[in-house]
Image: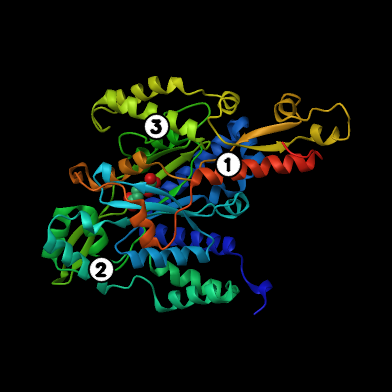
Amino acid sequence: MSLQSFVSPDLIRQRFSRAMSDMYREEVPLYGALMELVAQVNAGVLGSDERIARQLRSTGEIQRLDLERHGAIRVGTATELATLGRLFAVMGMQPVGYYDLTPAGVPVHSTAFRAVHESALQVSPFRVFTSLLRLELIDNPQLRDFAESVLARRTIFTPRALALIEQAETQGGLDDSAAEEFVEQALETFRWHHSATVTAGQYQQLSAQHRLIADVVAFKGPHINHLTPRTLDIDQVQELMPAHGITPKAVIEGPPRRECPILLRQTSFKALEEAVSFTDQPDSRGSHSARFGEIEQRGVALTPKGRALYDQLLNAARDALGDFPNEANAQRYNSLMAEHFRAFPDNHQAMREQGLAYFRYFVNDQGLATRQQADRPTSLEALIRAGHVRAEPLVYEDFLPVSAAGIFQSNLGDDAQSHYAGHSNRQAFERALGRPTIDELQLYADTQQRSLQECATALSLPAL
Ligand code: OOG
Ligand code: NI
């Protein structure tokens, strides 16, 4: 097979993300309602806020906005995680970052599978937040053994999906018809199944240990539990949700509202109670809640210095609140957040000058027009001051552990909070995955650096 006939992994990912969205819309109609609401709000923002519209056109993000979403899944074993890693690799998705959720009382650790290069992200920024259950944190040895034996018996991939993964690996890609079949087959892993694989009693036991454990262990596979579109104004969507029959959680996770958004803000609606049947009662109906909806607004990626400041202000606001944010203290939490985050500069120039955020640099027409002149500016700052080069915020492509914990909690119910003696164990996660996770900060630094190099080349300068 010649190399030319392979479909690019980026296009396979784009197709897969569409197929996933279509499947989830059928499975969870509220997701469709949320998508419509987000599309409406985004159109409104683009029509009325010239600054945002210009910025998104400038970076090209405007083209990916309607496609942009992330999903989340939870798997039970090292083999499942490692094979998922191979499945996502066929679509050009790599494991980026390590998230430990045990401090929030959720017995998992996670990574985000996503594209890593700005040009690939442009084709499809689809990401999947993927969590691995930490069975070693179950303190009841019988239940742990039981969970292990149930998980050992299941296969979450179709035989054809496994064959196509292998084909892609050995041949170096998939042609059009193989890619199409791959998308169909891969989708099966993430489908919802109404029938549990355990008895009602076993489900109760697993659920009593932690609702998340029942969600992972008692079903055929890692059903997609939410799919999150990107909005340009999360406060507006949050406010409009109730009128569309959707009840959001009490507080928006992440930083407070700002002129220049940073990182990621997220809100979700509670998990649906869904009818399920158990192996010993195939006709009677139990119920399980796992699948929910979420929206997010993405801002600029922060440097290590910016991130340290973010973490410091977030922790200070939470310490001052003295409790997890909830319905009752939401207003106080919002005002504490606004107050603390005054210490975080809210304009791009200051964030850039203080080294708090990552940017992409673009040459303006004026820069191109004057590139032959002997007296033109040659340093980055001088080029920016002269209007020859402009800086645009580099969008944050990842997740936030404290926010993720809040999202887990809101859909598992606050009663699901447990205390785990276990600690963060990135090595164990990477051993299970079969490869290291990628440092997201390095990816942002690389993208910023490439954009500087492109500017230098366009302006015939040795470097910037
Ligand atoms: C994942 C929760 C985290 C996010 O956007 O931070 C998450 C899960 O519930 O499996 O999706
Ligand atoms: Ni999410």
Q: As drawn, which residue projects farthest toward the right?
A: 373
Q: Is residue 441 above or below residue 13?
A: above
Marks 2/3: CA–CA distance: 36 Å
Query: Which residue does the numbered mark 3 point to in the structure image?
Result: 311
Query: Which residue does the numbered mark 2 point to in the structure image?
Result: 151
The reply to whether discs 3 and 1 touch (Cβ–Cβ < 8 Å) is no
Q: Is residue 79 left or right of residue 55?
A: left
Tell me residue 223's x, y (percent): 34, 61
Name which quarter of the figure residue 446 lies in: top right
Disc 3 crowd rating (10 Å Cα; few below 14, some 14-19, many 20+) is few
Q: Is residue 243 above or below residue 87?
A: above
Name which quarter of the figure residue 264 lies in: top left
Could you say which is closer to the camera, residue 284 or residue 128? Answer: 128
How many dots with numbers?
3
Mark 1 Cβ and ligand 1 under 8 Å apart: no
Q: Which mark is residue 83?
A: none
**Mark 2 or 1 closer to N-term?**
2
Marks 3/1: CA–CA distance: 20 Å
Name which quarter of the figure residue 146 lies in: bottom left
Q: Secondary structure at mark 3?
A: helix
Residue 354 in sight: yes
**Mark 2 or 3 closer to N-term?**
2
Disc 1 crowd rating (10 Å Cα; few below 14, some 14-19, many 20+) is some
Residue at image location 47% in from the left, 63% down from the top: 88
Tell me residue 432's x, y (percent): 36, 62
